């Protein structure tokens, strides 16, 4: 079977090379690596042109993770691959992961999307993300997060969402859904995509025997960076606007207001006072309906 692995790079050339090397070591599958560069501030290194089989495109602007993956998908010819695997450049896969996920899709026609558990690179026994349920009233993810690997299910199980860090999708599904919605830019585009697939009758599964290691938020500056605070919070409002009825949307807005007020106190106590204006900007942009890249 042939699988396209889609990567979006922004200034993380060495992490991208490490990621591609892990993909190239995959067993039992024919891999087509595809990478777009979102106008990185540093020049393209020589290895990019020399990497075996790599299909590469340099974009003229930073279009974000969502649109970047759509651009990578557009580099494929129709019917060229059966599956596409979206993978963060700051992640690596085990040699059997692609085969494990693709085999599950092969044998389960009801599945549209599958995901691997994603573990911390710094602590491979600790789960960073492994599916879960979506709670729409507060726009929260009830997911396996910071849990030991021993807490994973023994068999594949259905989930509401799969992380875009390591998501395998049927080629036809990604095409029919027209990919990610670019207004999210980055963060939560994966959840919105999974919910949209679910509404169309598709199903999402976690396959616990696969394995991906992740340098968490290395590409966005770390879990406490302004980028990693702004987009997840703002994009909850974009999703709420599209899926909640007026009453539930009002409830969510009230809840989000309380969250911002609480974070305005908590962040300084944790030594992150600089994040207070960031979360307020995310809140105000979310309320006003702004989307796309953050205009700082």
Image (tube, helix red, strand yellow):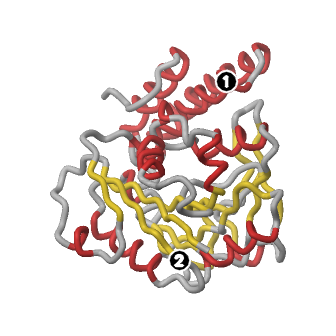
Callout in the foreground (2, 1)? 2
Q: Which residue is mark 2?
A: 30
Look at the numbered discs 2 and 1 and tell me whether their residues touch, using CB distance below 8 Å: no
Q: Which residue is mark 1?
A: 242
Q: Earlier in the sequence, mark 2 or mark 1?
A: 2
Relative to 58, say whether 268 is above or below.
above
Residue depicted at x 54% and y 70%: 120
In the image, 43: left or right of 211?
left
Count of residue discs: 2
The residue carrying pointer 1 sits among few (fewer than 14), some (14 to 19) or many (20 or more) residues within 10 Å by Cα, namely: few
Residue depicted at x 30% and y 54%: 57
Residue 175: x and y, percent? 59, 45
The residue carrying pointer 2 sits among few (fewer than 14), some (14 to 19) or many (20 or more) residues within 10 Å by Cα, namely: some
Nearest the eye: 54 or 140: 54
Nearest the eye: 251 or 119: 119
Name the quadrant of the C terminus.
top left
Alpha carbon distance from label 2 to label 1: 38 Å
In the image, 270: left or right of 260?
left
Relative to 39, say whether 76 is above or below.
below
SS at circle 1: helix
Q: Which mark is residue 98?
A: none
**Residue 254, quarter of the rendered image:** top right
Relative to 47, say whether 263 is above or below.
above
Residue 272: x and y, percent? 41, 44
Name the quadrant of the N terminus.
bottom right
Nearest the eye: 129 or 284: 129
């Amino acid at each position: 079977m042939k699988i396209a692995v889609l990567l979006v790079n922004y200034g993380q050339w060495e992490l991208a090379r490490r990621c591609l090397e892990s993909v190239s070591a995959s067993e039992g599958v024919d891999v087509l690596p595809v990478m777009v560069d979102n106008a990185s501030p540093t020049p393209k290194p020589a290895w990019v042109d020399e990497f075996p089989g790599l299909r590469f495109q340099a974009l003229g602007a930073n279009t974000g993770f969502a649109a970047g993956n759509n651009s990578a998908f557009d580099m494929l010819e129709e019917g060229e691959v059966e599956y596409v695997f979206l993978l963060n450049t700051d992640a690596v896969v085990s040699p059997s992961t692609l085969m494990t996920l693709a085999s599950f899709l092969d044998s389960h026609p009801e599945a549209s999307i599958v995901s691997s558990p994603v573990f911390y690179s710094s602590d491979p026994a600790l789960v960073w993300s492994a599916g879960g349920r979506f709670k729409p009233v507060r726009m929260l993810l009830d997911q396996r997060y910071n849990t030991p690997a021993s807490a994973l299910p023994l068999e594949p199980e259905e989930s509401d969402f799969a992380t875009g860090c390591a998501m395998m999708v049927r080629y036809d599904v990604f095409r029919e859904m027209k990919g990610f919605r670019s207004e999210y830019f980055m963060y939560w585009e994966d959840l919105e995509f999974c919910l949209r697939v679910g509404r169309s009758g598709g199903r999402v599964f976690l396959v616990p025997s696969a394995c991906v290691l992740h340098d968490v938020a290395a590409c966005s500056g770390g879990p406490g960076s302004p980028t990693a605070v702004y987009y997840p919070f703002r994009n909850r409002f974009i999703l709420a606007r599209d899926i909640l009825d007026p009453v539930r949307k009002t409830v969510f807005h009230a809840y989000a207001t309380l969250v911002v007020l609480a974070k305005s106190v908590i962040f300084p106590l944790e030594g992150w006072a600089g994040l207070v204006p960031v979360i307020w900007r995310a809140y105000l942009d979310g309320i006003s309906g702004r989307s796309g890249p953050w205009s700082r």
